[in-house]
Amino acid sequence: MAVWEIVRITVPEGEQEDFETVVRRYLPALQEEKGCLDLKLLRATDAEGALLLCVAWESKEYHTEVFTKTETFAEFAGVMAPYFVSPPEAFHAEVVINGLDSTR
């Protein structure tokens, strides 16, 4: 079962689209990373500058022990960091209910 890395990020007002462009630019590199299954970037509609970066990994270890030691991680973290208003909040999660059909 995939493990999702969930990161709450706050960027300065007016710089959200620039940050989204940075993330979009790294999608091809992330697709090539071992264990990386998917990525979603969610923009808050009621909290200016708030985003959720959600990355699906084959396991928590692929994120914490493999990816964090790669050049892609160092570059990606480096280009994102200048946009952070405060340190990002991160955790890992597993899907326990997947959609409305899960009750049927």
Image (spheres, grey):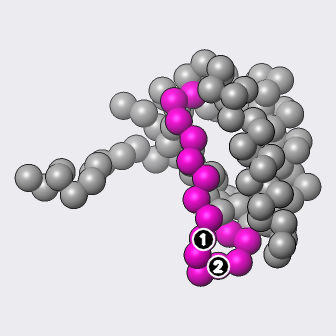
Identify the residue shown where x is 82% and y is 75%.
Answer: 13
- The image position of residue 18, as x and y in percent, is 83, 57
Identify the residue shown where x is 51% and y is 30%.
Answer: 37
76 and 26: which one is in front?
26
What span is colored magenta in the figure? Answer: 36-50
Most frequent secondary structure within the magenta stretch = strand
Read off the residue under disc 1. 44
Read off the residue under disc 2. 47
Give SS at disc 2: loop
Q: Report if residue 96 lies within the magenta region.
A: no
In the image, residue 5 sits, relative to residue 70, either above or below, namely below
Extreme residue toward the left, this view: 104
Which mark identifies residue 4? none
Instruction: Kindly report the distance in space between the C-alpha atoms of the residues bearing marks 2 and 1.
Output: 6 Å
- The image position of residue 29, as x and y in percent, is 72, 26
Identify the residue shown where x is 71% and y is 61%.
Answer: 9
